[in-house]
Image (cartoon, grey):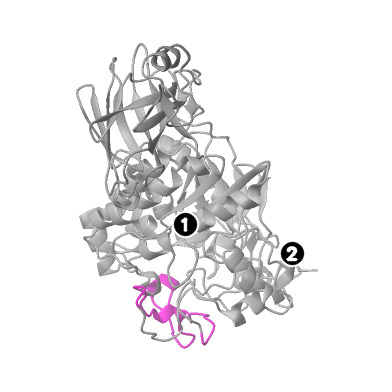
Amino acid sequence: MSRTRTALLAAMALVAGATGTAFAVDPGSAGIAAVPCTVDYKIQNQWSTGFTAAVTVTNNSAAKSSWSLKWSYAGDQKVTSGWNAKISQSGAAVTAANETYNAQLATGGSVSFGFQGSYSGSNAIPATFTLDGVTCNVDGDPGGPTDPPDPGGPGNRVNNPYEGAKVYVNPEWSANAAAEPGGSRVSNQPTGVWLDRIAAIGGAGGKMGLRDHLDEALRQKGSGELVVQFVIYNLPGRDCSALASNGELKADEIGRYKTDYIDPIKAILADPKYASLRIVTTVEIDSLPNLVTNTGSRPTAVPQCDVMKANGNYVKGVGYALNKLGDVPNVYNYVDAGHHGWIGWDDNFGPTATIMKEAATAEGATVNDVHGFITNTANYSALKENNFTINDTVAGKSVRESKWVDWNRYLDELSYAQAFRSQLVTAGFDSNIGMLIDTSRNGWGGTARPTGPGATTSVDTYVDGGRYDRRFNAGNWCNQSGAGLGERPKAAPAAGIDAYVWMKPPGESDGASKQIPNDEGKGFDRMCDPTYTGNPRNNNNMSGALADAPLSGHWFSAQFRQLMQNAYPPLS
């Protein structure tokens, strides 16, 4: 006979009230009545002014196509946010109703949700719960942590999630890599999973969805710690200066971004099933820096970027994402911070940190919802240029005067990331923030890699002869010819750096080299055309893109083989 939780009408109520534990006995036993529903209410984390709770409801009655759970608090508890249920509160009375994706509640089935709340004084577990008007019995534990949480949120976040942890290997990317000649040398490397449209949450085009990846992450985790990395990338009017990565949402669809994209992602990430994972999010690459560099009267301005600056939907969208995802105690938000060849100039550096702070305090977010920042996401900037320094002078000219450096303050990603971290702290972010650097395609090895400085004939021969980064211009970003795999992912590689990561999966295209009709919202960008002669954003240089490239995110075999060939450190 199957077993279900039941209640002795009087005796069990006394015992449960004394111990906080309900019994499970066979229904139909003499003197025992079946309980129509049970509620397991547990406080997960508690500090001086707030708490998080997990609630599981089990239905022992007829199957339901929708459900509503109600309870009342004896104290002044207030629910401030929730996940996996629509939660409302009027006075002491709280109602939690189903979301569309968890409305079905079978006989014997359970549903779980969670929330964050505030309180003062005591934080007692509610005495009574009703499911659709029927009283349930209660299992709860009024205890729980009472120490203040770590900085950054209500959970037990660690300072650097990558330290002491494995990182998730996406089996889909791994299979693509292993299928290439020599690909097994890197197919076990961890890469980011891109949620670049609403359909990707459930799984688009036969690919794994968000839950699929999280379930696989649990399998890979075993008994140790594991980080799983997701790229949150679907702002309205996304990436206003790059047509290849324009998304599915129009410039004014901020409401849809919130309800159809961020809310479902949060609901899944907040499932207690995944509480043991360290979930790292890269939040909305490219878009915020565009508001600084590609608007107004600058030569690099793009009309669509002016639209996004005027409507505020980049700032609102990032703020909303940080607020909602930051509510999940085991989520670590890292905001995209461009790269040195974009933000390294004086008139970009400080203003970009300022707009990061603006977004991190919009739509209910706070700086505590930001665990750190990531640079060079899906880009090619060299990690460290060793053959010259920013302070060198050649033939009477500073390195900064060279055509390549072009008065930038930074030569490479490591120096930029460390300096920008300090600027972000100055702008108001926590002094413990960490940086990530995407090293997936910035190795620049192979036979073209310089072994020393260039000739001192001029500052340009000196810089061009010695630089590892072989692009025509640091503004070139699409499927760059000559690029190689960079440093393999590793934790805490340098001061202020939480990890080197492969957030952009090597071998996944940046964009198509010619127009390709598609239903993914991806346009054709001339920067992905190898015949394109450029624009003000790359100082009118050739694009340097590879030919015959597929849509962004699609597998590009020729690129992957080149990346392996030019890897630095070299592949063994």
Mark seen at residue 569: 2
Name the element at disc 2: loop
Residue 466: tell me if it is visible: yes
Q: Main secondary structure of the magenta part?
A: loop
For marks 2 and 1, give the CA distance: 32 Å
Q: Between residue 118 and residue 26, name the one nearer to us.
A: 26
Counting labels gives: 2
Q: Quadrant of residue 49?
A: top left
Give how far across and how far down residue 466 sits, in percent: 68, 69
User: Where does label 1 land, which residue?
Assistant: 210
Image: 152 above or below 508 = above
Q: Amino acid at mark 2?
A: Pro
Give how far across and how far down residue 204 sits, in percent: 42, 68
**Residue 547 among those drawn in magenta:** yes
Give how far across and how far down residue 301 sits, in percent: 30, 67
Image: 191 above or below 146 = below
Q: Amino acid at mark 1?
A: Leu
Image: 503 above or below 263 = below
Pointer 1 local density, CA inside 10 Å: few below 14, some 14–19, many at least 20: many
The range drawn in magenta is: 519-548
**Residue 36 among those drawn in magenta:** no
Give how far across and how far down residue 408 sits, in percent: 50, 59
Disc number lying in front (2 or 1):
1
Image: 418 above or below 193 = above
Q: Quadrant of residue 521?
A: bottom left
Q: Residue at 27% of width from left, 46% of height from top?
A: 66
Q: Between residue 78 and residue 132, name the one nearer to us.
A: 132
Q: Residue at 30% of width from left, 56% of height from top?
A: 260
Q: Between residue 470 and residue 320, name the one nearer to us.
A: 320
Q: Mark 2 or mark 1: which comes first in sequence?
A: 1
> For this view, does 66 lie left or right of residue 572?
left
